[in-house]
Amino acid sequence: MLNRPRRNRSSAAIRTMVEENRLSVKDLLFPLFVMDGSATKTEIKSMPGIYRFTTDLLLKEIEECLNLGITSYALFPQVAEDRKDSLATESHRQGSLYLEAIHAVASRFPEISMLTDVAMDPYSSDGHDGIVKNGEILNDETLEVLSKMAVAQAQAGSKLIGPSDMMDGRVGYLRESLDDAGFTNVGIMAYSAKYASAFYGPFRDALESAPKFGDKKTYQMNPANSREALREAELDELEGADFLMVKPALAYLDIISLLRDNTNLPIAAYNVSGEYAMVKAAAANGWIDGEKAMLESLLSMKRAGAQVILTYFAKEFAQLKLS
Ligand code: PBG
């Protein structure tokens, strides 16, 4: 036999030599949750090992993760129910929990990269990503709220914003708002291909932000579509996005690969809460090896073409000190 592919698998050393992709902590971005109060952290039931932190403990957590080599983060707020309203006014109120937390993190850790979230759902009494009128999610009226939010976050010290809804034209609108306010160097990570997915459940538990009626199918994408993802990606690129994201990751590896082949922008993949929860639940039952399943799924996202992986596994991965 001339060709024996097994020769290149015959020892750990040769397998390492020929491996095409290698994960590093530098590939990972760690999403964190902040809540009101002090000296408290509470574990999210459906996401074992993941906590909401009060701002003081959030700073400690970032310090610890930074020492493990994690340099990129995302931050999401859990907003008290009595601060929510239909226009998400809390999202751009000076002195709000989120803006103060951004300011605290940005001043204490100027060297890190932190993606800040621009979407109405954490602050919306309707639990939707846009303004609701007669059961409809309005697009252009929502853009104005997003614009106030983005500028307020930039003023608080954010260098990278992530509009995580799926409104039309939001990247261009926010690019112009940031530029007009003098924030030409604040980047935009576009949630270009964000699907209407069942895998966001645990995240909505974490923020208590589940929609109060209906679903998100009139703005988030239909899981049946891939050409539509290309269209969304092209629009975001034209509107000035600095990164394109695919979300969720595991059930959408083909989309990561499709975008990788069709743009020169960096591609981010969001390994979402439900994907994390599935591995944790099966591992807790002794049904799979959680650590191996984590490594294999993160590697698959990198192999598909993701340059950045947003994952709740970031700290656990970093603690393994693999490289
Ligand atoms: C909403 C938002 C969601 C996530 C991030 N931003 C949920 C949703 O669209 O309902 C999900 C992240 C995760 O599941 O880890 N703007």
Image: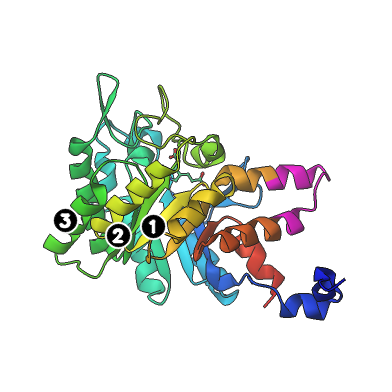
Q: In this picture, is 118 found above or below 70?
A: above
Q: Nearer the viewer, residue 160 or 90?
A: 160
View quadrant of ligand 1? top left
Q: Are circles 1 and 2 on residues that touch, CB within 8 Å?
A: yes
| Residue annotated with mark 2 | 241
Q: Do residues under tags 2 and 3 come within 8 Å of each other at their CB atoms?
A: no
User: Between marks 2 and 3, how big is the CA–CA gap?
Assistant: 14 Å
From the viewer's side, name the closer residue of 95 and 173.
Answer: 173
Q: Nearer the viewer, mark 3 or mark 1?
A: 1
Q: CA distance from mark 1 to mark 2?
A: 7 Å
- Mark 2 vs mark 3: in front: 2
Residue 107 appears in the picture as rendered: yes
The span picked out in magenta is 279-293
Q: Answer yes or no: is residue 32 visible.
A: no
Front residue of this view, candidates 146 and 18: 18
Quarter occupied by the N terminus: bottom right
**Vertical position of residue 74 compared to residue 247: above or below:** below
Q: Is mark 2 within 8 Å of ligand 1?
A: no
Residue pushed farthest front? 2
In this picture, residue 322 sits left or right of residue 259: right
The amino acid at mark 3 is Ser
- Residue 244 numbered mark, or none: 1
Q: Residues within 10 Å of mark 1 (few under 14, many from 20)?
A: many
In the image, the residue with mark 3 has its CB under 8 Å from the nearest atom of ligand 1: no
Q: CA distance from mark 3 to mark 1?
A: 19 Å
Element at label 2:
loop
Q: Secondary structure at mark 1?
A: strand
Residue name at image x 19 percent, y 51 percent: 173
- Locate residue 316 relative to residue 175 in the image: left or right: right
